[in-house]
Image (cartoon, rainbow, N blue to C red):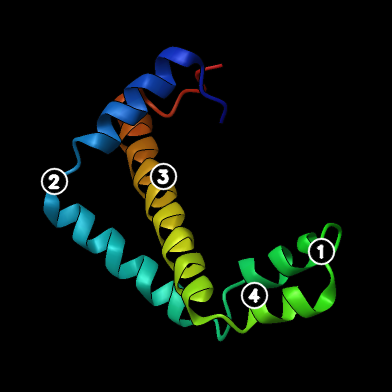
């Protein structure tokens, strides 16, 4: 399903107006998914990217920095919550519009 601009705007409005109870369920689901991973999947990708621009000792220090890991965890969680909210909103949009493709 592809969304045109109008449909995207409507989906975002739905996502922004989800009730707190729905947001709590989304957050719990995201937390459960994040707890399945031993390491944040963003960190290896980030370290691999950094090797293009920086030397290994600096990257190793970065990878061992707890504050960086916490920031990456917060970023990943926020991204997952945003996507999950929009996924719920798309399902509401689809049921409202008869599951049609809005391209």
Which of pointers 2 and 3 lies earlier in the amino acid sequence?
A: 2
Q: Residue at x 13, y 46 (%)?
A: 19
Between the C-alphas of marks 1 and 3, the distance is 37 Å
Above-or-below relation of 11 to 79: above
Place of residue 69 in the rendered image (x, y in percent of width and height, measured from the top left): 52, 75
**Contact, mark 1 vs mark 3 (Cβ under 8 Å):** no
Count up the numbered dots: 4
> Dot 1 lies on which element?
loop
- Mark 2 lies on residue: 19
What is the C-alpha distance between the residues marked 3 and 4? 33 Å
Q: Which mark is residue 54?
A: 1
Q: Residues within 10 Å of mark 2 (few under 14, many from 20)?
A: few
* Nearer to the camera, 43 or 18: 43
- Disc 3, disc 4: CB below 8 Å? no
Return the disc, 2 or 1, that comes first in the chain's sequence.
Answer: 2
Asked whether disc 2 touches disc 3, contact meaning CB atoms under 8 Å apart, the reply is no
Front tag of 1 and 3: 1
Q: Mark 3 highlights which residue?
A: 87
Which of the 4 image quarters holds residue 15? top left
The residue where tag 4 is placed is: 62
Q: Earlier in the sequence, mark 4 or mark 2?
A: 2
Neighbourhood count class around disc 4 (C-alpha, 10 Å): few under 14, some 14–19, many 20 upward: some
Please rate how many residues cluster around mark 3, counting C-alpha atoms within 10 Å: few if below 14, some from 14 to 19, many from 20. Answer: some
- Secondary structure type for disc 4: helix
Snapshot quadrant of residue 10: top left
Q: Residue at x 44, y 48 (%)?
A: 83
Residue found farthest to the left: 20
Q: CA distance from mark 2 to mark 3?
A: 15 Å
Q: Earlier in the sequence, mark 4 or mark 1?
A: 1
């Amino acid at each position: 399903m592809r969304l045109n601009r109008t449909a995207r705007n409507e989906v975002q409005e739905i996502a922004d107006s989800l009730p707190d109870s729905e947001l709590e369920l989304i957050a719990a689901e995201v937390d459960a998914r994040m707890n399945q991973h031993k390491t944040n999947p963003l960190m290896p990708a980030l370290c691999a990217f950094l090797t293009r621009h920086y030397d290994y000792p600096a990257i190793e220090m970065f990878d061992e920095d707890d504050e960086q890991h916490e920031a990456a965890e917060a970023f990943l969680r926020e991204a997952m919550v945003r996507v999950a909210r929009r996924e719920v909103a798309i399902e509401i949009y689809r049921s409202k519009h008869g599951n049609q493709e809005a391209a």
